[in-house]
Amino acid sequence: MRPPLPLLRLSTRPLLHIHAHPKPLSTTARPTHPTASPNRRYFTYATLLLSGLSTGLLLSLYLPRPQLLQLIYPLPTPPPHAADSVEAREHAEGLERELQGLELGASSPAGSSLEQAAQREREQISRYTEHRPYATTPPGPHSLTGYSLRGPSRFAIPPLVFASRDRKEQIFFLHLGTGLCGHEGVVHGGLLGTVLDESLGRTALLALPTNIGVTATLSLAYKKPTFANQFVVIKTQLVEVKGRKAWVEGRIESLEGEVLVEAKALFVEPRMAKFLDNSSVKAALA
């Protein structure tokens, strides 16, 4: 037999006891600062918020706004002036002065001398002749752009046109008023199509034998929104002429050269055009 296992000996060491010794309270009082009341804090925050909103509103009225912001938060359009009012006449005179100050060609390349820029401008002017459609033609109720849409906040002044001497290219300078919009501040796409139809048609009719033609096809590609109350540049070019058909293409650009709308069109001369009176058409194209 195995000897019995020795009994476990209980430790006689005393258990450890943790005694908490509380720290004596400090007799020195901390300095207290007066706290602002909740009402005063709310009043301060409200004042700062109203000041920021007022400043932002004033700046948005007088500083140029980003195009995206203008699309999302457009400014309200004021009503147009009466056609026979002093304000309408002064507005048209101001636009005419601004129009006459525009340059025919694009801005000069960086690094070019003033003499080179002047030489290019003289060459361009010698290639083009100046025209003012609807300026001398008496307005009639049958004309959409020459009569119905003519006036303050619409087409306040006639367009300025430069036609190449070979009649294959034309450059139009046109002001688009605030009354030509679909979305607030953005010119209606259908109106831009009408403007391109007439501009392309002018270039095509000059190439047709009788100067009489109708729109057969017109395709448009809208690239960017066209904002109202600005001058735009319309450039058209004759692509091909075959008998009674004329193909043309063009685009609407901003003054900075940004393409807004592109277009292609086919104009066809009616078979009986030689028997029609084209005196009014020739007068409009002159």
Image: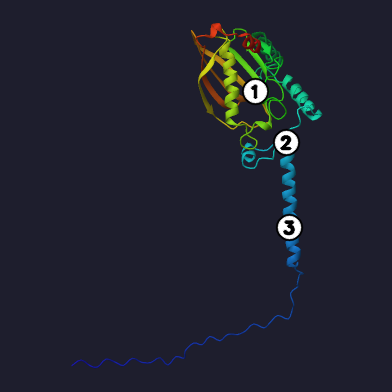
The Cα atoms of the two marked residues, 2 and 1, are separated by: 20 Å
Tag 2: amino acid: Pro
Quadrant location of residue 140?
A: top right
Where is residue 253? Give x, y as percent. Answer: 61, 25
Residue named by callout 3: 46
Q: Which of marks 1 and 2 precedes in the sequence?
A: 2
Number of other residues with Cα within 10 Å of mark 2, as a class: few under 14, some 14 to 19, many 20 or more = few
Instruction: Please state the total of marks drawn on the protein image.
Output: 3
Relative to 99, residue 272 above or below: above
First in sequence, mark 3 or 1: give its number: 3
Residue 73 position within the rendered picture, expressed as x and y whole percent measured from the top left: 64, 42
Distance CA(mark 2)–CA(mark 3):
35 Å
Give the image quarter of residue 65: top right
Q: Amino acid at mark 1?
A: Thr
User: Who comes first in sequence, dot 2 or dot 3?
Assistant: 3
| Badge 3 density bin: few <14, some 14–19, many ≥20, Cα 10 Å | few
Could one spot residue 209 in this view of the protein?
no
* Residue 29 x, y percent position in the rendering: 74, 77
Q: Which residue is under mark 2?
A: 79
Q: Nearer the viewer, residue 263 or 255?
A: 263
Per the image, the residue denoted by label 1 is 145
Which numbered marker is on residue 61? none
Which label lies toward us, 2 or 3?
2
Amino acid under disc 3: Ala
Q: Residue at x 52, y 25 (%)?
A: 220
